[in-house]
Image (spheres, grey):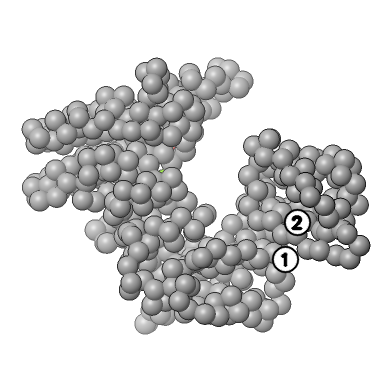
Amino acid sequence: MALIVQKFGGTSVANQERIRSVAQRVAETYDQDNDLVVVVSAMSGVTDRLIQMAKEAMENPDRRELDVLLATGEQTTASLLALTLRGMGYPTRSLLGYQADVVTDRSYGNARIIEIGARRIQALLRERNIVVVAGFQGHDLNGDITTLGRGGSDTSAVAIASAIRADICEIYTDVDGIYTADPNVCPRARKLKEISYDEMLNMASLGAKVLQIRSVGFAKKYNIPVHVRSSFSREEGTMVISEHEGMESVAVSAVSHDKDQARITLKKVPDQPGIAAKIFGPIADSGIVVDMIIQNTRAGGQTDLTFTVPKADFKRALQIQKEVAQAIGAEDVFGDPDIAKVSVIGVGMRNHSGVAAIMFNTLAKERINIMMISTSEIRISCVVEEKYTELAVQVLHTAFGLDREEEAG
Ligand code: ASP
Ligand code: MG
């Protein structure tokens, strides 16, 4: 007997028929004598539609009121699943975010969970109820409804799992696990049996497509094993767990890519104290997140400085830098939105040498130019021209021995 949190995403509860098959799965787990909390998303497409409706009502929707509206998506599915289970004869209760005591800060639309007072959930569990909780929502200290950002029901599930000290959090979704690369880009990508929290946190877009990254931070902090798996099959998915020794036997576990990047370069910047602050201060003030930064020194007390920002912020960042360049006396500013970041990730990198060399050689063989490089303890990233993204991912995937065996026949 175990204490299990199961989370079902939007496609898994997209209509009544699918809610019924979710209910069957839940019932099966319950019948195996497990204690069970089920967290649900809104039906797929509903959150988008609600946002659209809000925009029709008010051009730039008031954020508090928007959250009141968005929370209804998950309220609907929580109730429908509870009704279905009760109809099948199972003792079940649904709870909204505030009833489950999910306390957040006040950042409507992107609130962070402060704590979960799991008393009510635990009381219901003690009476052998199946507890269904509406994901994605909480309340602030004023009692106002908040939502946790897109994809936030993953974080609801992991946070609830940590609050009730669940043995495992199962995330049921429309993919069957985490892959060594995006299968749409790299046909030879393999499903991973397991991956560490830190690798997952470093996989950026590859991981973020499957789990809200914030949920992985929670899982790591409270050491909750997360099983990412498909709600449409019985196959095992991928376990996201804390690192263990066996994981270090391979140097690279995954290759990820991120096309959502743009590059800005300031040419011939005076090489003086305070200049970097003048360049990045206004960017930070306007809420733009800088990812990579490179500074190269040239002769004559001047340097070139290059950094990347999300594509959506490119025009704004470029405009800001044009003004900064004038103010600090830089020669020129130019930008390039057609870039991509390709990364290799693996905890094994710590004890395998030469990973960077293999990466650079592999790209060189394909004549792919590396524009920027950044590294962390378990990741190496290169910025390349966007049109080489697919090629770069594929050749790196092969070079690090990640390719799936060709299926016979
Ligand atoms: N329904 C919300 C969304 O679409 C939350 C979630 O599905 O995790 O983003
Ligand atoms: Mg999701």
- Which element is circle 2 on? strand
Q: Position of residue 228 (x, y in %)?
A: 33, 55
Q: Which amino acid type is shown beneath numbered disc 2?
A: Thr
Q: Give me the residue at 49% from left, 28% from top.
A: 107
Q: Is residue 348 above or below residue 301?
A: below
Residue at x 34%, y 38% (from the top left corner)? 156
Left or right position of 222 against 121:
right
User: Are the residues tagged 1 and 2 within 8 Å (C-beta)?
Assistant: yes
Which residue is disc 1 drawn over?
371
Helix, strand, or loop for circle 1? loop
Looking at the image, how many numbered discs can be counted on the residues?
2
Answer whether residue 374 is visible to the viewer in this image: yes
Q: Is mark 2 within 8 Å of ligand 1?
A: no
User: Residue lying furthest front in this view?
Assistant: 273
Closer-to-camera residue (242/97): 242
Number of other residues with Cα within 10 Å of mark 1, as a class: few under 14, some 14 to 19, many 20 or more: some
What quarter of the picture does the C terminus occupy?
bottom left
Q: Which residue is mark 2?
A: 306
Q: CA distance from mark 1 to mark 2?
A: 10 Å
Eyeballing the image, is 136 above or below 12?
above
Counting residues from the start of the chain, the first of labels 1 and 2 encountered is 2
Q: Position of residue 22 (x, y in %)?
A: 24, 43
